[in-house]
Structures are given as structure tokens and as C-alpha cells.
Amino acid sequence: QVQLVESGGGLVQAGGSLRLSCEASGNIFSINVMGWYRQAPGKQRELVATIASDGRTNYADSVKGRFTISRDNAKKTVFLRMNSLKPEDTASYYCFITQTGGRDSWGQGTQVTVSS
């Protein structure tokens, strides 16, 4: 079994910053991709950012230039630095990992609220 524990969410004013962290533990052999989704009430889930084992990153157009994803492979942790936050970034943020072989695991989510 794999556990993903997120931290770093909270309430911030528009223009502010937050850093999310997600540490994976448990039955982990080899992590290929790490990333973050978000979902706001009444909206579809959105893939925010991913980072592959070789460091390649991908971002949703809505966060490019404002968010930065990174990972610490030794600590099995993925980070999401969020700058210039906007009210439309308000959502629950979920981290995930994809292990080699395709097995996905998900965190419980952390709430990010951006006030205008």
C-alpha cells in the first residue's frame, strides 16, 4: 500500500504564494511521474503540473509562469510552488504518483483558498 501525504495548503490573498508538498511512502518501487491535480466545486478536475523522473515538466496553460513543480527523489516528495495566486486557483489540490508499470496512487487533497 502507498500513502501520499500533502501539506502546505491554506488561505492566501490574491497575489500571494504557497508551497505544497506531498511525501510518498509505503510499497514504492520506482516512481515515474509525480504531479498535481486540482478540483474546484462544480468544476472538472484539472491537471495542474507533472514532473517525470528525468525532470521534464508539464504545466496547464492556466498556471504556466506562476507555478513551479519540483521533486526530491531521495525523499519521494513532490513540491508545487505557487506564485501570483488568483481567486480562480481556489481548489482542492491532489498529488499523485505513477510508478513504473502504471500503478497510480493519490493523496487525500489539500485546500487552497485565494481571496480577492
Image (tube, helix red, strand yellow):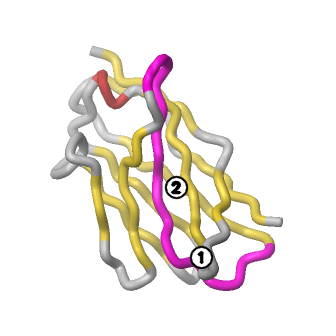
Magenta residues, as a range?
27-43
| Residue bearing the label numbered 1 | 75
Farthest residue toward the left? 65
- Using the rendered image of the protein, determine whether residue 94 is visible from the camera's viewpoint: yes
| Residue bearing the label numbered 2 | 21
Residue 108, relative to residue 33: is it above or below?
above
Q: Secondary structure at mark 1?
A: loop
**How far is mark 2 from mark 1, CA to CA?**
11 Å
**Which label's residue is closer to the chain start, 2 or 1?**
2
| The C terminus lies in quadrant | top left
| The N terminus lies in quadrant | bottom right
Left or right of residue 50: residue 4: right
- Circle 1 packing at 10 Å, graded few (<14), some (14-19), many (20+), is few
* Amino acid residing under circle 1: Lys
Left or right of residue 72: residue 46: left
Farthest residue toward the right? 1
**Residue at x-position 27% and y-position 34%:** 85
Q: Foreground: 104 or 24?
A: 104
**Residue at x-position 46% and y-position 59%:** 35
**Residue at x-position 40% and y-position 54%:** 80
